[in-house]
Image (cartoon, helix red, strand yellow):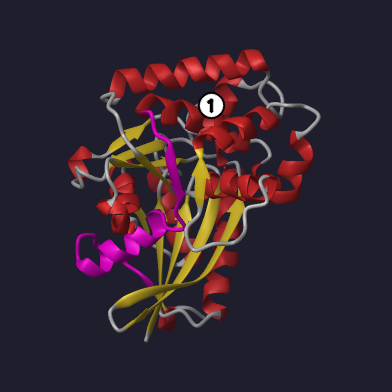
Amino acid sequence: MKKYAVIDFSRTSLSLLVANEQMGRLEIVFKTYRPILIGDMVNKKEKLTDKGISKIVSEALELIESARNMEVDEIYGISTTLLRNIRNADEVTEILKDKTGLSITSLSGKEEAYAALYANENYKMLEKAVLFDIGGTSTEICDFSHPYENDMISLDFGSSTIRSSFVKDVYPTKEEEAEIKAFVKGMLRDHVEKQEMENAILSGSNMNALYKIYQDYYDVPQAHERLMQYKKLKKLIKVLMDDKRRNALIIKNVPEKIHLIVPSAICLKVMLKYFNIGNITVSSYGVKEGFLKLLRKGEIQATPLKREERG
Protein backbone atom coordinates (compact mmCIF):
# COMPACT_ATOMS: atom_id res chain seq x y z
CA MET A 1 0.00 0.00 0.00
CA LYS A 2 1.24 3.48 -0.92
CA LYS A 3 0.16 6.67 0.78
CA TYR A 4 -0.05 10.06 -0.96
CA ALA A 5 -0.63 13.60 0.24
CA VAL A 6 -1.58 16.68 -1.78
CA ILE A 7 -1.32 20.23 -0.44
CA ASP A 8 -3.32 22.80 -2.39
CA PHE A 9 -2.24 26.44 -2.25
CA SER A 10 -5.06 28.83 -3.11
CA ARG A 11 -5.71 32.53 -2.52
CA THR A 12 -8.06 31.76 0.38
CA SER A 13 -6.64 28.64 2.00
CA LEU A 14 -4.14 25.84 2.24
CA SER A 15 -5.66 22.38 2.31
CA LEU A 16 -4.30 18.88 2.75
CA LEU A 17 -5.57 15.58 1.39
CA VAL A 18 -4.12 12.18 2.37
CA ALA A 19 -5.04 9.05 0.43
CA ASN A 20 -4.08 5.39 0.39
CA GLU A 21 -3.58 3.53 -2.86
CA GLN A 22 -4.55 -0.12 -2.51
CA MET A 23 -5.42 -2.63 -5.22
CA GLY A 24 -5.27 0.17 -7.79
CA ARG A 25 -7.86 2.30 -5.99
CA LEU A 26 -7.57 5.51 -3.98
CA GLU A 27 -9.07 5.71 -0.51
CA ILE A 28 -9.29 9.16 1.08
CA VAL A 29 -8.25 8.87 4.72
CA PHE A 30 -7.75 12.47 5.88
CA LYS A 31 -8.59 16.05 4.93
CA THR A 32 -7.90 19.34 6.62
CA TYR A 33 -8.33 22.99 5.67
CA ARG A 34 -6.57 26.13 6.86
CA PRO A 35 -8.22 29.43 5.86
CA ILE A 36 -5.80 32.16 4.78
CA LEU A 37 -6.85 35.28 2.92
CA ILE A 38 -3.70 35.58 0.84
CA GLY A 39 -5.41 38.14 -1.38
CA ASP A 40 -5.14 40.62 1.48
CA MET A 41 -1.34 40.14 1.37
CA VAL A 42 -0.88 41.06 -2.29
CA ASN A 43 0.47 44.60 -2.69
CA LYS A 44 -0.34 47.27 -5.27
CA LYS A 45 2.37 45.90 -7.55
CA GLU A 46 0.46 42.60 -7.61
CA LYS A 47 3.19 40.84 -5.66
CA LEU A 48 2.71 38.57 -2.68
CA THR A 49 4.29 40.40 0.26
CA ASP A 50 7.04 39.05 2.50
CA LYS A 51 4.40 38.65 5.22
CA GLY A 52 2.25 36.61 2.86
CA ILE A 53 5.16 34.40 1.81
CA SER A 54 6.14 33.79 5.44
CA LYS A 55 2.55 32.89 6.26
CA ILE A 56 2.17 30.28 3.54
CA VAL A 57 5.60 28.80 4.32
CA SER A 58 4.63 28.44 7.98
CA GLU A 59 1.27 26.87 7.16
CA ALA A 60 2.83 24.55 4.56
CA LEU A 61 5.40 23.29 7.06
CA GLU A 62 2.63 22.42 9.51
CA LEU A 63 0.69 20.52 6.84
CA ILE A 64 3.84 18.69 5.76
CA GLU A 65 4.39 17.72 9.39
CA SER A 66 0.81 16.41 9.57
CA ALA A 67 1.42 14.31 6.46
CA ARG A 68 4.73 13.05 7.85
CA ASN A 69 3.00 11.96 11.06
CA MET A 70 0.65 9.88 8.92
CA GLU A 71 3.67 8.18 7.29
CA VAL A 72 2.91 9.46 3.81
CA ASP A 73 5.24 8.19 1.08
CA GLU A 74 4.90 11.14 -1.33
CA ILE A 75 3.69 14.71 -0.85
CA TYR A 76 2.66 16.82 -3.83
CA GLY A 77 2.13 20.57 -3.87
CA ILE A 78 -0.34 22.14 -6.27
CA SER A 79 -1.35 25.76 -6.75
CA THR A 80 -4.87 26.35 -7.97
CA THR A 81 -5.12 30.12 -7.59
CA LEU A 82 -2.26 31.25 -5.34
CA LEU A 83 0.25 31.73 -8.16
CA ARG A 84 -2.20 33.07 -10.73
CA ASN A 85 -1.95 36.77 -11.45
CA ILE A 86 0.85 37.57 -9.01
CA ARG A 87 4.00 39.03 -10.49
CA ASN A 88 6.42 37.21 -8.19
CA ALA A 89 5.06 33.69 -8.73
CA ASP A 90 8.51 32.32 -9.62
CA GLU A 91 10.03 33.84 -6.49
CA VAL A 92 7.27 32.41 -4.29
CA THR A 93 7.71 28.97 -5.89
CA GLU A 94 11.46 29.04 -5.27
CA ILE A 95 11.08 30.11 -1.64
CA LEU A 96 8.53 27.39 -0.97
CA LYS A 97 10.88 24.82 -2.49
CA ASP A 98 13.82 26.12 -0.44
CA LYS A 99 11.99 26.40 2.88
CA THR A 100 9.75 23.33 2.69
CA GLY A 101 11.27 21.03 0.07
CA LEU A 102 7.96 21.02 -1.76
CA SER A 103 7.82 21.48 -5.54
CA ILE A 104 4.66 23.31 -6.62
CA THR A 105 2.71 22.31 -9.72
CA SER A 106 0.72 25.34 -10.87
CA LEU A 107 -2.64 24.50 -12.45
CA SER A 108 -4.37 26.76 -14.94
CA GLY A 109 -8.09 27.40 -14.62
CA LYS A 110 -8.88 24.78 -17.26
CA GLU A 111 -6.54 22.26 -15.63
CA GLU A 112 -8.19 22.88 -12.26
CA ALA A 113 -11.63 22.39 -13.78
CA TYR A 114 -10.52 19.22 -15.56
CA ALA A 115 -9.12 17.77 -12.32
CA ALA A 116 -12.38 18.52 -10.48
CA LEU A 117 -14.41 16.91 -13.27
CA TYR A 118 -12.14 13.87 -13.38
CA ALA A 119 -12.48 13.44 -9.61
CA ASN A 120 -16.25 13.29 -10.09
CA GLU A 121 -16.40 11.17 -13.23
CA ASN A 122 -18.82 8.75 -11.52
CA TYR A 123 -21.54 11.38 -12.01
CA LYS A 124 -21.20 11.34 -15.80
CA MET A 125 -24.09 8.86 -16.04
CA LEU A 126 -26.54 11.52 -14.85
CA GLU A 127 -28.66 13.23 -17.48
CA LYS A 128 -27.61 16.75 -18.45
CA ALA A 129 -25.17 17.13 -15.58
CA VAL A 130 -22.82 20.06 -14.91
CA LEU A 131 -20.21 20.55 -12.23
CA PHE A 132 -19.83 23.85 -10.35
CA ASP A 133 -16.81 24.72 -8.21
CA ILE A 134 -17.06 28.24 -6.77
CA GLY A 135 -13.64 28.87 -5.28
CA GLY A 136 -12.11 31.94 -3.72
CA THR A 137 -10.91 33.68 -6.88
CA SER A 138 -12.17 31.50 -9.73
CA THR A 139 -15.28 29.54 -10.64
CA GLU A 140 -15.17 26.38 -12.70
CA ILE A 141 -18.06 25.07 -14.81
CA CYS A 142 -17.78 21.64 -16.43
CA ASP A 143 -20.33 19.90 -18.65
CA PHE A 144 -20.07 16.14 -18.09
CA SER A 145 -21.04 15.54 -21.73
CA HIS A 146 -17.89 17.41 -22.86
CA PRO A 147 -15.17 15.85 -20.67
CA TYR A 148 -12.11 17.30 -22.38
CA GLU A 149 -9.72 19.85 -20.93
CA ASN A 150 -10.30 22.36 -23.74
CA ASP A 151 -14.04 22.26 -23.00
CA MET A 152 -13.58 23.32 -19.39
CA ILE A 153 -14.71 26.79 -18.34
CA SER A 154 -12.92 28.79 -15.66
CA LEU A 155 -14.34 32.22 -14.86
CA ASP A 156 -12.29 34.95 -13.22
CA PHE A 157 -14.37 35.43 -10.08
CA GLY A 158 -14.99 33.61 -6.82
CA SER A 159 -16.33 34.21 -3.33
CA SER A 160 -13.28 36.20 -2.23
CA THR A 161 -13.12 38.45 -5.29
CA ILE A 162 -16.90 38.97 -5.14
CA ARG A 163 -16.60 39.98 -1.52
CA SER A 164 -13.73 42.41 -2.12
CA SER A 165 -15.46 43.94 -5.14
CA PHE A 166 -18.99 44.34 -3.83
CA VAL A 167 -19.22 43.85 -0.05
CA LYS A 168 -18.21 46.66 2.31
CA ASP A 169 -18.94 44.89 5.61
CA VAL A 170 -18.86 41.24 6.72
CA TYR A 171 -22.08 40.35 4.93
CA PRO A 172 -23.61 41.79 1.74
CA THR A 173 -26.58 44.12 1.98
CA LYS A 174 -29.67 43.67 -0.22
CA GLU A 175 -28.29 46.30 -2.60
CA GLU A 176 -24.92 44.55 -2.74
CA GLU A 177 -26.69 41.21 -3.31
CA ALA A 178 -28.39 42.71 -6.36
CA GLU A 179 -25.04 43.96 -7.66
CA ILE A 180 -23.48 40.53 -7.18
CA LYS A 181 -26.34 38.84 -9.03
CA ALA A 182 -26.08 41.27 -11.94
CA PHE A 183 -22.32 40.73 -12.18
CA VAL A 184 -22.54 36.91 -12.12
CA LYS A 185 -25.38 36.94 -14.67
CA GLY A 186 -23.23 39.10 -16.93
CA MET A 187 -20.23 36.78 -16.61
CA LEU A 188 -22.36 33.76 -17.44
CA ARG A 189 -24.06 35.49 -20.35
CA ASP A 190 -20.70 36.57 -21.79
CA HIS A 191 -18.77 33.34 -21.32
CA VAL A 192 -21.13 30.38 -20.94
CA GLU A 193 -23.69 29.09 -23.42
CA LYS A 194 -27.12 29.06 -21.81
CA GLN A 195 -28.75 25.66 -21.92
CA GLU A 196 -31.23 23.55 -19.99
CA MET A 197 -29.50 21.21 -17.55
CA GLU A 198 -31.01 18.82 -15.00
CA ASN A 199 -28.30 18.05 -12.46
CA ALA A 200 -25.67 20.12 -10.69
CA ILE A 201 -22.71 18.53 -8.95
CA LEU A 202 -21.14 20.93 -6.45
CA SER A 203 -17.45 20.59 -5.63
CA GLY A 204 -14.99 22.46 -3.42
CA SER A 205 -14.80 23.73 0.14
CA ASN A 206 -17.29 26.59 -0.29
CA MET A 207 -19.99 24.28 -1.63
CA ASN A 208 -19.33 21.72 1.10
CA ALA A 209 -19.58 24.49 3.70
CA LEU A 210 -22.93 25.58 2.26
CA TYR A 211 -24.21 22.01 2.44
CA LYS A 212 -23.17 21.81 6.09
CA ILE A 213 -25.40 24.81 6.83
CA TYR A 214 -28.21 23.36 4.69
CA GLN A 215 -27.97 20.05 6.52
CA ASP A 216 -28.17 21.73 9.91
CA TYR A 217 -30.97 24.14 9.01
CA TYR A 218 -33.20 21.45 7.52
CA ASP A 219 -32.08 18.71 9.96
CA VAL A 220 -30.95 16.47 7.10
CA PRO A 221 -29.62 13.10 8.34
CA GLN A 222 -26.18 11.87 7.35
CA ALA A 223 -26.31 9.98 4.07
CA HIS A 224 -23.98 8.65 1.40
CA GLU A 225 -25.55 10.96 -1.18
CA ARG A 226 -25.68 14.60 -0.13
CA LEU A 227 -28.60 16.20 -1.93
CA MET A 228 -30.15 19.67 -1.87
CA GLN A 229 -33.46 20.92 -3.26
CA TYR A 230 -33.38 24.20 -5.17
CA LYS A 231 -36.51 25.58 -3.50
CA LYS A 232 -35.14 24.83 -0.04
CA LEU A 233 -31.77 26.31 -0.99
CA LYS A 234 -33.48 29.55 -2.09
CA LYS A 235 -35.21 29.78 1.30
CA LEU A 236 -31.92 29.14 3.08
CA ILE A 237 -30.22 31.93 1.15
CA LYS A 238 -32.96 34.28 2.35
CA VAL A 239 -32.05 33.25 5.90
CA LEU A 240 -28.37 33.89 5.14
CA MET A 241 -29.33 37.41 4.04
CA ASP A 242 -31.23 38.01 7.31
CA ASP A 243 -29.20 39.94 9.90
CA LYS A 244 -31.06 38.31 12.80
CA ARG A 245 -30.86 34.67 11.74
CA ARG A 246 -27.65 34.02 9.83
CA ASN A 247 -24.96 34.52 12.49
CA ALA A 248 -25.91 31.52 14.61
CA LEU A 249 -26.08 29.24 11.57
CA ILE A 250 -22.76 30.32 10.11
CA ILE A 251 -20.77 30.50 13.34
CA LYS A 252 -22.10 27.13 14.51
CA ASN A 253 -21.28 25.32 11.28
CA VAL A 254 -18.56 27.09 9.27
CA PRO A 255 -17.03 29.99 11.23
CA GLU A 256 -13.95 29.90 9.00
CA LYS A 257 -16.18 30.81 6.04
CA ILE A 258 -17.92 33.76 7.69
CA HIS A 259 -16.77 36.23 5.01
CA LEU A 260 -17.22 33.90 2.04
CA ILE A 261 -20.28 31.71 2.51
CA VAL A 262 -22.95 34.28 1.66
CA PRO A 263 -21.24 35.49 -1.56
CA SER A 264 -20.78 31.81 -2.50
CA ALA A 265 -24.48 31.10 -1.94
CA ILE A 266 -25.58 34.11 -3.99
CA CYS A 267 -23.32 33.09 -6.90
CA LEU A 268 -24.59 29.52 -6.77
CA LYS A 269 -28.23 30.60 -6.86
CA VAL A 270 -27.60 32.65 -10.00
CA MET A 271 -25.78 29.76 -11.68
CA LEU A 272 -28.48 27.22 -10.86
CA LYS A 273 -31.16 29.56 -12.22
CA TYR A 274 -29.13 30.26 -15.37
CA PHE A 275 -29.14 26.55 -16.22
CA ASN A 276 -32.63 25.93 -14.77
CA ILE A 277 -31.33 23.18 -12.49
CA GLY A 278 -33.45 21.60 -9.78
CA ASN A 279 -31.39 18.55 -8.75
CA ILE A 280 -28.30 19.31 -6.67
CA THR A 281 -25.67 16.88 -5.38
CA VAL A 282 -22.75 17.95 -3.19
CA SER A 283 -19.58 15.98 -3.85
CA SER A 284 -16.82 15.22 -1.37
CA TYR A 285 -14.31 15.06 -4.22
CA GLY A 286 -12.48 17.97 -5.79
CA VAL A 287 -9.28 19.16 -7.41
CA LYS A 288 -6.85 17.34 -5.12
CA GLU A 289 -8.54 13.99 -5.68
CA GLY A 290 -8.64 14.62 -9.42
CA PHE A 291 -4.99 15.62 -9.44
CA LEU A 292 -4.00 12.32 -7.80
CA LYS A 293 -6.10 10.29 -10.22
CA LEU A 294 -4.61 12.11 -13.23
CA LEU A 295 -1.12 11.73 -11.76
CA ARG A 296 -1.54 7.98 -11.41
CA LYS A 297 -2.94 7.81 -14.94
CA GLY A 298 0.12 9.67 -16.29
CA GLU A 299 -1.80 12.72 -17.58
CA ILE A 300 -0.04 15.04 -15.12
CA GLN A 301 3.67 15.10 -14.29
CA ALA A 302 4.79 16.37 -10.87
CA THR A 303 7.73 16.01 -8.50
CA PRO A 304 6.91 14.73 -5.01
CA LEU A 305 8.57 15.35 -1.70
CA LYS A 306 9.41 11.78 -0.75
CA ARG A 307 9.54 10.28 2.71
CA GLU A 308 13.32 9.79 2.61
CA GLU A 309 13.82 13.47 1.71
CA ARG A 310 12.17 14.71 4.88
CA GLY A 311 14.11 15.02 8.07
Q: Where does label 1 land, which residue?
A: 162
Determine whether, in the image, residue 239 is placed left or right of residue 7.
right
Task: Determine if the magenta segment contains residue 118.
Answer: no
**In the rendered image, is residue 43 in sight?**
no
Instruction: Classify the position of the N terminus by image quarter.
Output: bottom left
* Residue 202 rendering spot, x and y as whole percentages: 44, 45
Question: In this picture, is 216 found above or below 306?
Answer: above
Q: Residue at x 19, y 66 (%)?
A: 298
Residue closer to the observer: 210 or 13: 210
Determine whether, in the image, residue 193 is placed left or right of residue 15.
left
Neighbour tally class for label 1: few under 14, some 14-19, many 20 plus, Cα within 10 Å: many
* Residue 265 rendering spot, x and y as whole percentages: 56, 34
Residue closer to the observer: 204 or 59: 204
Question: In this picture, is 296 found above or below 128?
Answer: below
Residue type at mark 1 is Ile
**In the image, farthest residue toward the right:** 244
**In the rendered image, is residue 176 in sight?**
yes
Task: Determine if the magenta segment contains residue 287.
Answer: yes
User: Which quadrant of the view contains residue 306?
Assistant: bottom left
* Residue 216 rendering spot, x and y as whole percentages: 68, 50
Determine whether, in the image, residue 251 is placed left or right of residue 177.
right
Q: Residue at x 31, y 50 (%)?
A: 117
Q: Residue at x 41, y 52 (%)?
A: 93
**In the image, farthest residue toward the bottom:** 1
Determine whether, in the image, residue 228 is placed left or right of residue 189.
right
User: Which quadrant of the view contains residue 63?
Assistant: bottom right
The residues colored magenta run 276-305
Question: In this picture, is 69 found above or below 301?
Answer: below
Say what secondary structure mark 1 lies in. helix
Residue closer to the observer: 129 or 39: 129
The total of numbered circles placed on residues is: 1
